Amino acid sequence: MLKLIRCEFEVDAPLETAWQHLAQVERWPSWARHIRRVELKPPGDLTLQTSGTFHLSNGVRSTFKMVELNPPHHWKWVGQFLWITVHYDHIFEPINDQRTRLIW
């Protein structure tokens, strides 16, 4: 069974700023307490060749591989979380010059 989970919220940041902050995936553990560590291959900027592993604070690991990339508007990766294949979509929509809507 396919289940869609959608999370939408707005941030007080221009589109480029929101993208630059969230595209630094290796830094996610600094603000996402459930993520202990992130391994990116290759390290650094997101590319269509990016793959990686999230090491969660509960000991679980989740892997992913980039399948779509359109900076600064969208990226999608597909990965395993436990026994489930998950398609993680990350959409960035400008609301105005100072606000961005994020849709996961």
Image (tube, rainbow, N blue to C red):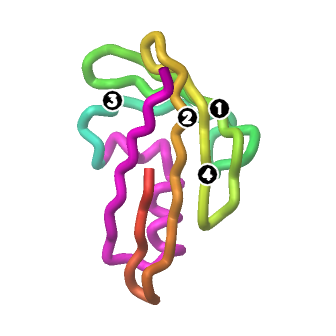
Sequence-wise, the earlier of marks 4 and 2 is: 4
How far across and how far down the image is residue 46, in percent? 64, 49
The crowding category of the residue bearing disc 2, from other C-alpha atoms within 10 Å (few below 14, some 14 to 19, many at least 20), is some
Residue at 40% x, 23% y: name it.
Answer: 55
Question: In front here: 94 or 54?
Answer: 94
Q: Is residue 93 above or below residue 85?
A: below
Q: Is residue 20 above or below residue 61?
A: below
Q: Which disc is residue 87 wearing? A: 2
Q: How many marks?
A: 4
User: Which element type, helix, strand or loop, lies under badge 3?
Assistant: strand
How far across and how far down the image is residue 47, in percent? 71, 48
Question: In front here: 44 or 72?
Answer: 72
Disc 2 vs disc 3: Cβ atoms closer than 8 Å? no
Q: Which residue is denoted by mark 3 in the rendering?
A: 36
User: Which element type, helix, strand or loop, lies under badge 2?
Assistant: strand
Between the C-alphas of marks 2 and 3, the distance is 21 Å
Sequence-wise, the earlier of marks 1 and 3 is: 3
Question: In front here: 87 or 56?
Answer: 87
Kindly indicate the quadrant of the structure image that contains residue 52. top right
- Span colored in magenta: 1-30
